[in-house]
Image: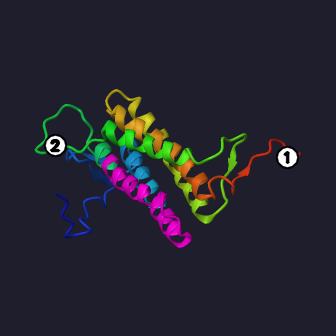
Amino acid sequence: MVVLNKIYTKTGDAGTTALGTGERRPKHDLRIASYGTVDETNACLGVARLTLATEGEGTVSPMLARIQNDLFDLGADLCTPDNGEKLEYEPLRIVDAQVDRLEGDIDTLNAELEPLRSFVLPGGTMAAAQLHVARTVSRRAERLMVELAADDSEPVSAAALKYINRLSDFLFVASRYVNNKGAGDELWVPGANR
């Protein structure tokens, strides 16, 4: 259970923060940057959900609400590296079922879209543009997580890596879906302005 009764603790004033294990790390640490960028992705999704509400789209928003919750799970997973040490609690981990659900959501939305013949320029409706922003931020989170996982002393679970990889796929498909099911997509025309 999370209890936040005091928002400022002053423990980070010297430029460090605590992992879920209690270990303190510099705020510029790659693990901190990884879950910080996951949090940034989550904030982008919040803006996208607000935009969807004003545009009256009701299919994608509940999916995004589940994903926002999953992103807190992912942040908790990354905040507590599985380095074999015994903890006083069972750390929260991303599981394959969360990846499977995300894949199912991708398939559900993609079934109503025409196949692409070119890359899509980010834009269209405001919601589609917001989802593209979230997609690019999630890709940055993925790059950071992959870099973190490349260090043998910094464990990142396979399920966490799969989840963040599928998330950007979902956000791409969702952006097309809310863009009038792809009809509002503006396609890249290679060399158009030469």
Q: Position of residue 186 (x, y in %)?
A: 73, 53
Magenta stretch mostly in which secondary structure?
helix
| Quarter where residue 177 is shown | bottom right
Tag 2 residue: 90
Query: How many other residues sit within 10 Å of disc 2, few (<14), some (14-19) or many (≥20)?
Result: few
Q: Residue 192 bears which disc, if any?
A: 1
Q: Where is residue 108 in the image (x, y as percent from the top left)?
A: 49, 46
Q: Residue at x 49, y 39 (%)?
A: 143
User: Which residues fall within the magenta stretch?
Assistant: 45-74
Of labels 1 and 2, earlier in sequence is 2
Between 55 and 154, the one nearer to me in the picture: 55
Asked if 186 appears above or below 114 in the picture, the reply is: below
Q: What residue type is labelled 1?
A: Ala
Q: What residue type is labelled 2?
A: Glu
Between 130 and 23, the one nearer to me in the picture: 130
Left or right side of 192 for 70 = left
Hey, which residue is sitting farthest top in the picture? 152
Q: Position of residue 114 (x, y in %)?
A: 65, 45
Question: At numbered mark 1, what does the secondary structure look like: helix, strand or loop?
Answer: loop
Q: Residue 44 bears which disc, if any?
A: none
